[in-house]
């Protein structure tokens, strides 16, 4: 079953036509309004251009438009009768790794743009690699600017073969290739008569039909507790001494009567009720925000996690992770930071860097003693209190964490590999 | 996954999660209640989020003195009905000195009656998080807004100081004096809002429904003309069937021609809407953009 919301990220080099593609998707699905399109046209003419520059629809901040660059992840929305789409659009240059990591963290699919004239550049591989690292397992390789290579099939086939081979090497990922011209509109939302050799679906059709997120539903039950609800009896006279645990199910399902494990306390109890304002439920699923009631009076607080007792997560005070450093201040070994993982929060230190990854060559560099902005590496982390986790490859919500420094800045994103 | 899981359920669940994060992470949060459709949805979601308990934060309405009488009536009745604690804050000095967009210009008028009033209310009540109904789809400077948006001790927004937001990890860590603006409706579009209002049968201010009203056509915008003090010299009001897509201050909110008198008809109108909703707000026009206003502390 395909999801009703598809979150995807778009990656490409600076001049691959990414903004043009997004602008066209928005305009042709009516995700952009006439006055916004008209504004983009006027602005383009003021700068001496002609017609609509689709990229002006998507460049958000005045500071960016003046400099002709984009500096941050921008979110765009459009819908068709089949699906709602959320695009996390990562800019293609400075701060690139940091932005792509952020935009990929919630995405199920990546659209990677390649300029047909240039073929696969180092950056294209880097984009795919980082998206894969963040757990994206579905790639659309859009070979763009086909109009500038005479819509020739040989050019397309050469790039396609190389890129599909590269994606296959990353492991566990599916990919599909499509020749387009974002500028002319070939195979974006409309068919094209200029590439009769391509018989596959249009880009929008792929986005509408792709199945991406079954992992959450099939996974073992995980319920990070956000809040304990203990309203005063005067506010809920029909439910005296009410006590419920509020959260959003991050994987699996839970039924009334199920045994659940409470971590890190390692106690068990039975689910006696699943509550929502729309009425009680017998069963709840991944992505649902609910309030769960338990049979036993156990001291449970924010940061605790309810889990399936047959397939429990790990509870440890140290783990191995892939880390993406995002801050201008370098990572310092054995410096105190705060690790936040779903609703858990604990003091922690990074006590070892196993190696840094060169995201262009995929070579490992070691020994190293520091990490700088946009560095990616494998590290060992020690926490003050034990934390509850799954490997990131199993569950992004219970395996992905951030590191916060003393200045309260979010300085790194991490993905747990194992113990 | 449940068979009746839809994109609206997904958005609802995400927003409930965000609202709960605010209450878990902040000492003294407040919900900025603007009386409009987005506020109505926000309140509906907050009630779901904390059920069966009461709402764990008060509402703050920044009243410019130029709100439609229908809005104030709705505010009083609705907050009473659901038992919400309502704080109304006004910049009395500016109102007493006769601040008006035709006199001060729109930017200065908004600066005094909205931005300054909001910042002084946050200061007065020591709120450390303010929950608002802004959506990323509304306006292009909002497309990059975080769900948890950091403000410095002057209430100002610096795009370069915003933190990366990954997965569903929203960091509410702040220093003394700083505060957070939180946007649980970030991923909703105007269409989603109306589809959800229909699905949940949420009450909204009657101004959203079409009826025959007195308006003047000012530079292509239909400005309500019930009260002639907001008119420029030579403007002649005419009767038209209109409704409001967004609700702000009377002198600065344009109506749109419409015959939609039911929620279903409004939702259907959204499907074919060609013009963005912010086009009906004078504040978004002119040299002083939304981006500039956000930097100053506007919502």
Image: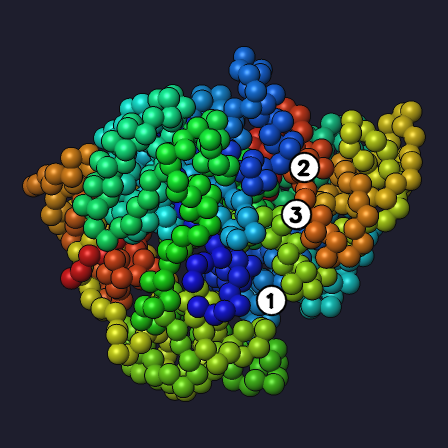
* Image quadrant in which you'd find residue A359: top left
Q: CA distance from mark 1 to mark 2?
A: 32 Å
Among all residues in the image, which is located at the extreme left?
A367
Q: Position of residue B203 (x, y in %)?
A: 72, 61
Q: Chain of mark 3?
A: B
Q: Is residue B39 visible in the rendered structure shown here?
A: no
Q: How many marks overall?
A: 3
Look at 66% across and 54% down and name the residue there. Answer: B194
Q: CA distance from mark 3 to mark 2?
A: 11 Å
Q: Where A17 falls versus B119 (above or below)? A: above
Check disc 2 and report the residue beneath it: B275
Q: Position of residue A240 (x, y in %)?
A: 55, 86
Horizontal side of residue A182 vs A319, given as left or right: right
Could you confirm whether marks 3 and 2 are on the same chain?
Answer: yes
Could you confirm whether marks 1 and 2 are on the same chain?
Answer: yes
Could you confirm whether marks 3 and 1 are on the same chain?
Answer: yes
User: Nearer the N terminus, badge 1 or badge 2?
Assistant: 1
Q: Where A261 falls versus B109 (above or below)? A: below
Check disc 1 and report the residue beneath it: B47
Marks 1,2: beta carbons within 8 A: no
Look at 55% across and 48% down and name the residue there. Answer: A80
Closest to the camera, between mark 3 and mark 2, is: 3
Check disc 3 and report the residue beneath it: B271
Quarter containing the N terminus of chain B: bottom left
């Amino acid at each position: 079953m395909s999801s009703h919301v598809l979150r995807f990220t778009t990656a490409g080099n600076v001049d691959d036509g990414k903004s043009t593609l997004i602008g066209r998707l928005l305009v042709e699905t009516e995700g952009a309004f006439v006055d916004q399109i008209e504004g983009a046209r006027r602005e383009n003419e003021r700068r001496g251009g002609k017609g609509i520059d689709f990229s002006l629809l998507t460049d958000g901040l005045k500071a960016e438009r003046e400099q002709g660059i984009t500096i941050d992840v921008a979110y765009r929305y459009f819908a068709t009768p089949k699906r709602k789409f959320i695009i996390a659009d990562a800019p293609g240059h400075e701060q690139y790794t940091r932005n792509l990591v952020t935009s990929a963290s919630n995405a199920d699919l990546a659209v990677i743009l390649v300029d047909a004239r240039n073929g696969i550049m180092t950056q294209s591989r880097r984009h795919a690699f980082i998206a894969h690292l963040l757990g994206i397992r579905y790639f659309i390789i859009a070979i763009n600017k086909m109009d500038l290579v005479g819509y020739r099939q040989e050019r397309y086939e050469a790039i396609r073969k190389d890129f599909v081979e590269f994606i296959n090497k990353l492991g566990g990922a599916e990919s599909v290739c499509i020749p387009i011209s974002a500028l002319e509109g070939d195979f974006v939302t409309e068919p094209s008569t200029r590439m009769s050799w391509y018989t596959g679906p249009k880009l929008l059709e792929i986005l509408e039909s792709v199945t991406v997120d079954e992992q959450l539903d099939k996974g073992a039950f995980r319920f990070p507790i956000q809040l304990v609800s203990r309203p005063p009896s005067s506010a809920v006279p029909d439910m005296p001494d009410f006590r419920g645990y509020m959260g959003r199910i991050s994987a699996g399902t839970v039924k009334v009567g199920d045994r659940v494990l409470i971590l890190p306390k390692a106690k068990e109890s039975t689910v006696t009720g699943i509550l929502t304002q729309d009425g009680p439920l017998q069963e709840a699923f991944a992505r649902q925000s609910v309030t769960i009631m338990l049979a036993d009076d156990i001291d449970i607080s924010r940061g605790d996690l309810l889990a399936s007792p047959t397939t429990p997560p790990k509870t440890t005070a140290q783990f191995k992770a892939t880390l993406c450093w995002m801050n201008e201040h370098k990572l310092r070994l054995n410096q105190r930071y705060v690790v936040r993982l779903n609703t858990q929060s604990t003091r922690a230190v990074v006590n070892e860097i196993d190696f840094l990854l060169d995201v262009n060559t995929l070579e490992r560099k070691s020994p190293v003693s520091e990490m700088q902005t946009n560095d990616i590496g494998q590290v060992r982390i020690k926490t003050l209190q034990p934390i509850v986790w799954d490997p990131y490859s199993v569950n992004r919500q219970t395996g992905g964490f951030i590191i916060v420094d003393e200045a309260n800045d979010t300085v790194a994103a991490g993905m747990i590999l194992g113990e | 996954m449940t068979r009746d899981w839809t994109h609206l359920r997904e958005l609802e669940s995400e927003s409930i999660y965000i609202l709960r994060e605010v209450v878990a992470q902040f000492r003294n949060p407040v919900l900025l209640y603007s009386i409009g459709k987005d506020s109505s949805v926000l309140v509906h979601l907050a009630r779901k989020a904390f059920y069966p308990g009461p709402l764990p934060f008060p509402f703050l309405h920044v009243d410019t003195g130029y709100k439609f009488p229908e809005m104030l009536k709705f505010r009083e009745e609705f907050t009473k009905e659901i038992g919400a604690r309502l704080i109304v804050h006004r910049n009395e000095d500016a109102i007493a000195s006769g601040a008006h967009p035709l006199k001060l210009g729109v930017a200065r008028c908004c600066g005094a009656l909205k931005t300054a009033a909001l910042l002084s209310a946050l200061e007065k009540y020591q709120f450390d998080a303010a929950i608002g109904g802004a959506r990323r789809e509304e306006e292009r400077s909002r497309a990059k807004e975080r769900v948890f948006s950091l403000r410095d001790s002057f209430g100002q927004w610096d795009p370069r100081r915003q933190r990366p937001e990954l997965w569903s990890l929203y960091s509410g860590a702040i220093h003394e004096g700083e505060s957070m603006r939180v946007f649980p409706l970030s991923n909703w579009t105007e269409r989603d809002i109306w589809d959800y209002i229909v699905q949940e049968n949420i009450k909204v201010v009657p101004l959203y429904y079409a009826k025959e009203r007195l308006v003047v056509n000012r530079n292509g915008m239909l400005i309500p003309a019930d009260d002639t003090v907001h008119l420029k010299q030579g403007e002649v009001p005419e009767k038209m069937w209109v409704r409001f897509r967004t609700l702000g201050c009377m002198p600065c909110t344009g109506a749109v021609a419409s015959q939609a008198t039911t929620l279903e008809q409004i939702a259907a109108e959204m499907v074919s809407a060609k013009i963005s909703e912010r086009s009906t707000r004078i504040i978004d026009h002119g040299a002083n953009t939304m981006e500039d206003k956000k930097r100053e502390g506007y919502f």
